[in-house]
Image: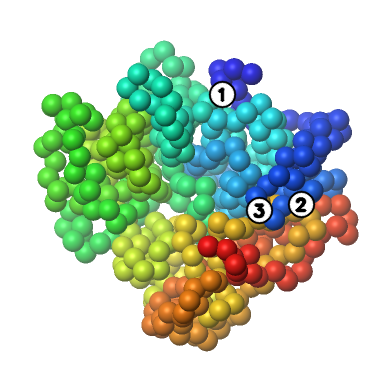
Amino acid sequence: MSHNNLSQQLISHKTVLGVVVSIFVLGFLLERMGTSTTTTTATSMLSVPAGPPGISLIPSEEDEALAKDPDGQVYHVIFSTDCGTYQHWQSYLTFFRAMKVKQPGHVTRIASGCTREEKEVIEHWFANHVQHMSQRFHLLLTPKFSEVKDETGKVIGEYPFFNKPHGLKYWLEHSPLMDFDGHNDFPTTRDDIVILIDPDMSILRPITKDFTSDEDIVIAPFRKNHIIARTVAHGKPFAQTYGFASQFLNMDLEKIDGPDSPLLKTTHEEGRLYYPVGPPYIATATDAYKIALKWTEFVPKTHAQYPHLLAEMFAFSQAAISAKLPHQLINSLMVSDTHSGNGEGWPLIDRMPADQVCQIAREADHTKYGLPYVVHLCQRYSLGKDWFFGKRRIPHDVFDCPNPLFEEPPDNVGTSYDYKWPPNAKEKTNLTPEMAQREAFMLCHLTTALNEAAEYYKRSACASGQSNLKKSKKVADLFRGHT
């Protein structure tokens, strides 16, 4: 199948899967997953077990109403993945959390570079296990964008994060939700709000355009005298603060954007104030498209000068400057690194009652306590020797019917330990009460969120009596003996 045909696939909730298709998918998966490097067995999370139809946590009338907020605003949460099994469970968790918090608007997984076989698997997986969560959830398949090419066009490597900028642009140009015909300029007044997150982000509370509350919005003190806006609008994009300051200016910027580029006129102070940004990125669709055009142009050039992990993020910052779109930076869109000081939303966690932090993290009720918007599970979290969470060795079949759930930390885990000793570490690391509280929040939320998603999956997909709901597996045990 050509990329052009592949790229037009947007999954409809009306897709009906027959028994023959299910058998084919299961047979393919039994063969594919048998060679996995994780602990997957003959049965995988991508199989299509016989079970009751899925029931959404959102009543159908409410789900329909959530297509727009009460003021008529349309939101689009999008996230970019490849087509491998590693990001299937993360994507499922993202959709599940969007359903649970009743995220308004549409949520779309953009999967890039699928083979014919992967395309069939991912389509059937989405139709069987995701679409029933909400009619506002979508899947868009795109061509492969991750190839690194030299000046002659020869492919010389892979950089998977190319999928993010190109996936955004492709979605804006090809999603039926955007109504862009590709022949004219992108609408200059497209008011839809686009929220680009990573697939390994667990949504804690609905993400909207409104950041007017000082109770649960953290902005760095030195930026408070340079506030651009408190509400996302045209010319006023928002994003999470990241800790790379203005490093993206330390390049041959003329080679990236030409001799008349605004990049050459941007000071490092301006760079630090408005542009050290990362996901969640939030902008109107029109502004998102302006950035996407520059981002896709810049990212291979930036990567050529800086062939490392942050290349696509640096290119976004450069694209925002070139498009003359300074961002309002918010620290509390995300928590991720417990050692990041106050650069993330940790002040919200630090002020929680120490004996309630685990319960608050599990419930994630932002109406009771101020919460960040997402948990980014890209780090490792640990308390004592037994309580640990890391995503790298979570089995790709984690939701499979016979697999047990994970043991969850006790409610007092944050006050019971003053050290962490992760699997395979040679010695323990002492923690202050503040750091223990942060680790506890992450451990309690992520373990519970993964368990809730797994239990929902099992109740929706597994045959009667086939769901293993015992919380008998420790995440720490998956890492012992591994680096």
Q: How many marks?
A: 3
Q: Nearer the viewer, mark 2 or mark 1?
A: 2
Q: Which mark is residue 41?
A: 2
In the picture, measured across the screen, residue 222 lies left or right of residue 383, that is left
Q: Nearer the viewer, mark 3 or mark 1?
A: 3
Of residues 159 and 483, the one nearer the viewer is 483
Of residues 231 and 152, the one nearer the viewer is 152
Q: Which residue is mark 1?
A: 7
Q: Secondary structure under badge 3?
A: loop
Task: Please state which amino acid type lies under the numbered disc 3.
Answer: Thr
Q: Which residue is mark 3?
A: 38
Image: 396 above or below 131: below
Pointer 2 and pointer 1: residues touching (CB < 8 Å)? no
Of mark 3 and mark 1, the one earlier in the sequence is: 1
Q: Is residue 406 visible?
A: yes
Of residues 182 and 80, the one nearer the viewer is 80
